[in-house]
Image (cartoon, helix red, strand yellow):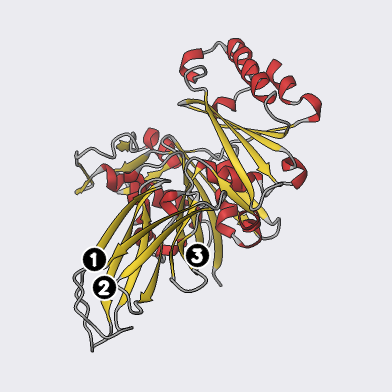
């Protein structure tokens, strides 16, 4: 009997973390390294053993490189744009090949622990949108041998929200703070909930403190790091009533917070430190179901999310709006399509409707170049895709109408900026 897994992956340049949904505990559980149960951070390196002709990943690669003759491959993220090819074990590889292998082997190293493991859903969380990373991850399903919709790619921020809003509600009755102190510096996110509006909205305010606090800058001067972080905490905590504070990133992995801890916990405020917030949030997203409730209840307003619906008007007496895509998700995960049959018209009215304000923008698209056909015998497909949270395109295709009126294969592309 197969074991079905919902998996969350936090994929960063230096390390990867995995978690799976534990049905008994009804919560995500982090996956530790096989040879080191104390850590969940799996280094992003590969090692090819000339002795066994086998590839190793993560901590196993780190261990094998000192015990066997072979080749180490690292810096994979940094070299994705490189055209360099490496001949290893009689086969040529690009860094794109290494990237796909790295991700697949991280996942396989977990699945191999079970006799008949099957991925039901895999959500991969990455720090920021990178077109090359997304392109490679979008094709990962082929390498893993799963259906395309089994894999979803999301962001650290989205995963953080899924984690936070699947904790006890008393922790997010008011605003919530998230500090992310990674190798590129400190970033702060304040999550506010507007319950007095319809729809209820979650808004995220981002402050970039990377120029003021970076790990390389401090070196071993943890005292000054604590002093500087305390000042930032004091400044940000005055802006809103914070129920809970979450701290993540390798910058918080060592014990240097002395003075700042007292400020974080003032007034009974709860503070939590964890390196696995994003992987567990991705796992909650993978499970879906009850864990999506807050997205059904709240409209999520972040810098990476689309804030408006895109659709068409049926041009009837009620001016009925038919949505093609709905706002509230990251722009790179927002897409949709419908089919329509034209009724005594060669025009479409495209509507862009703001989910928070209700404001609308309308554009009329005239369909040129289609042969004259009887009424209701022209079928069109309409798809929407995004290039950013405010930019994208409406793609209209002539589908004809069966064998009687073959398609012209004409495609119309209407770009928009809202």
Task: Give the residue at x 55% y 61%.
Answer: 5
User: Under tag 3, what secondary structure?
Assistant: strand
Disc 3 vs disc 2: Cβ atoms closer than 8 Å?
no
Disc 2 vs disc 1: Cβ atoms closer than 8 Å?
yes
Q: Nearer the viewer, residue 50 or 133?
A: 133
The residue where tag 3 is placed is 118
Mark closer to the chain start, 3 or 2? 3
Task: Give the residue at x 70% y 59%.
Answer: 24
Q: Is residue 168 visible?
A: yes
Looking at this view, name the residue that lies furthest to the front: 317
Mark closer to the chain start, 3 or 1? 3
Q: Nearer the viewer, residue 57 or 225?
A: 225
Coordinates of residue 21 in the picture (x, y in percent): 61, 56
Coordinates of residue 391 in the picture (x, y in percent): 37, 47
For the residues labelled 3 and 1, the Cα–Cα distance comes to 40 Å
User: Under tag 1, what secondary structure?
Assistant: strand
Residue 103 in the figure: left or right of residue 277? left
Coordinates of residue 346 in the picture (x, y in percent): 29, 72
Task: Give the residue at x 39% y 45%.
Answer: 388
Q: How many marks?
A: 3
Coordinates of residue 368 in the picture (x, y in percent): 22, 68
For the residues labelled 3 and 2, the Cα–Cα distance comes to 40 Å
Disc 3 vs disc 1: Cβ atoms closer than 8 Å?
no
The residue where tag 1 is placed is 411
Image height check: is 397 above or below 222? below
Image height check: is 317 above or below 253? below
Q: Nearer the viewer, residue 64 or 277?
A: 277
Task: Give the residue at x 63% y 47%.
Answer: 201
The residue where tag 2 is placed is 398
Mark closer to the chain start, 2 or 1? 2
């Amino acid at each position: 009997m197969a074991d079905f897994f919902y998996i969350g992956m936090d994929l960063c340049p230096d390390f990867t973390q995995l978690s799976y949904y534990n049905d008994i505990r009804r919560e995500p559980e982090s996956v530790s390294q096989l040879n080191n149960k104390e850590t969940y951070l799996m280094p992003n390196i590969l090692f090819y053993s000339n002795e066994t002709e086998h590839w190793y990943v993560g901590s196993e690669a780190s261990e094998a490189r000192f015990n066997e003759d072979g080749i180490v491959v690292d810096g994979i993220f940094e070299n994705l744009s490189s055209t360099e090819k490496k001949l290893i074990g009689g086969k040529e590889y690009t860094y794109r090949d290494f990237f796909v292998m790295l991700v697949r082997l991280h996942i396989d190293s977990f699945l191999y622990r079970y006799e008949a493991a099957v991925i039901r859903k895999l959500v991969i969380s990455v720090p920021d949108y990178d077109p090359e990373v997304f392109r490679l991850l979008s094709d990962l399903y082929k390498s893993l041998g799963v259906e395309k919709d089994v894999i979803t790619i999301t962001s650290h921020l989205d995963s953080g929200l899924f984690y936070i809003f699947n904790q006890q509600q008393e922790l997010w009755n008011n605003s919530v703070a998230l500090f992310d102190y990674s190798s590129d510096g400190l970033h702060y996110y304040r999550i506010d909930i507007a319950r007095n509006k319809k729809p209820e909205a979650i808004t995220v305010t981002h402050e970039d403190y990377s120029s003021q606090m970076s790990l390389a800058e401090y070196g071993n001067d943890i005292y000054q790091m604590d002093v500087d972080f305390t000042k930032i905490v004091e400044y940000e905590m005055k802006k809103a009533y914070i129920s809970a504070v979450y701290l993540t990133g390798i910058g918080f992995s060592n014990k240097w917070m002395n003075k700042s801890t007292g400020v974080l916990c003032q007034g009974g405020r709860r503070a939590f430190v964890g390196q696995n917030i994003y992987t567990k949030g991705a796992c909650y997203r993978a499970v879906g179901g009850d864990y999506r409730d807050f997205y059904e209840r709240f409209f999520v307003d972040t810098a990476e999310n689309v804030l408006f619906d895109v659709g068409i008007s049926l041009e009837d007496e009620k001016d009925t709006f038919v949505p093609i895509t709905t706002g509230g998700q990251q722009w790179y995960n927002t897409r949709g399509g419908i089919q329509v049959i034209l009724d005594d018209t060669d025009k479409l009215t495209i509507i862009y409707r703001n989910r928070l304000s209700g404001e609308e923008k309308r554009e009329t698209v005239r369909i040129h170049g289609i042969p004259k056909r009887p009424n209701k015998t022209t079928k069109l497909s309409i798809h929407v895709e995004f290039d950013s949270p405010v930019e994208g395109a409406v793609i209209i295709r002539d589908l004809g109408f069966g064998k009687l009126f073959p398609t012209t294969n004409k495609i119309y592309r209407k770009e928009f900026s809202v």
